[in-house]
Amino acid sequence: GLVSYELELNTVGDAKCQPKVREALATYFAKNRDALSDQSKERLDRNPMRILDSKDPKDLALVAAAPPMHELLCAEDREHFDEVIAGVERLGHPYKVAQTLVRGLDYYTRTVMEFVLTDPEFTKAGDIAVAAGGRYNDLVQTLGGPPIQGVGIAGGVDVLYGALQKEGVRMGGETATDVYVLSAEKGDGADRLQVADPLRQAGFTVAIDYSDRPLDKQLESAVKHGAKVAVIRGTPEARGGNVIVRDLVAKTQRVTRLAAVVTEVGRHVPKHVTPPLFEGPTNPDEHEPGAAGEAPFLKDDRD
């Protein structure tokens, strides 16, 4: 997958805390209203948190001097964000906390994120986010549905296309689930993700069951997903750095160290034969910006 990126993270608080944050930021920016850009003046009246996202040169100094977001948050929101950061650090992924990151839509709660390209070929044009999103605890209920929490992320196809092609990434083939990760313990989502991460890095397609359902129900879901292997943690045998690798086709299982889980799973799941991500065009007339096999044409005003 993509290598040259950095994850930017922030928290915008939940519905209980956001009014307090907005009030503090509104008070600060109102004192400097005349110095704000026209767009930020409009945001000041609607949602002053959005001013933090401004890229207008007139706003940058005021944004930099604004009250730090994390000092305005409720204790519960800060604790939740600390747990998120601990999980990211545990996975060893590069990240930084960006306290002015708020995203462009007002329905986000708590965690917001952007995946920013770090390849110099892209950074010379400024910060380019290849994907972004966050958490929205209240969105479904606001739209008339049940109180279901959610997390979403979306990527820009053209930017992702260019970044993957630049790094020579090859992918494709079957998208069926290879491995299903589950656990007998409750509330151990970070541990399940830690099991899944090296398998994904090795190229396996992995689904994670984050529910606290009984183990047999989770195994039923693994079969419904068409998974070839289930990796189980949290049982008496699968503790202290051990996991169980269960072959769902042969109906056999083996206890193995987490450090060896990629090798053990590889004994049960065939290696993927992955064709090139982009095939070259067969018609010479197709050789134009954006045609198959060509890099996307990214307009640059400096041209």
Image: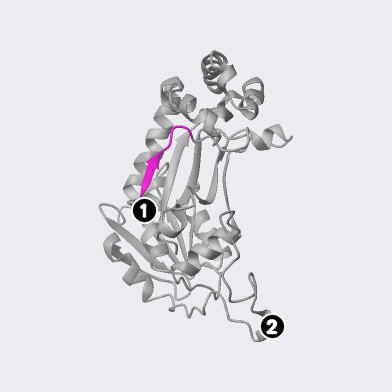
Where does residue 171 sit, x and y in percent of width and height? 50, 72
Q: Is residue 264 above or below residue 56?
A: below
Q: Is residue 219 visible?
A: yes
**Residue at 41% of width from left, 39% of height from top?**
84
Indicate the secondary structure of the residue bearing disc 2: helix
Q: Is residue 119 visible?
A: no
**Residue at 47% of width from left, 50% of height from top?**
115
Where does residue 198 sit, x and y in percent of width and height? 36, 61
State if disc 1 and disc 2 touch (CB < 8 Å).
no
Q: Which of the numbered marks, if any, corresponds to residue 218?
A: none
Reading the image, the residue beneath label 2 is 285
Q: Residue furthest right?
A: 144
Q: Amino acid at mark 1?
A: Gln
Dividing the image into 4 quarters, which one contains the C terminus?
A: bottom right
Q: Is residue 283 above or below residue 251?
A: below
Reading the image, the residue beneath label 1 is 194
Magenta range is 93-100
Verify whether residue 262 appears in magenta: no
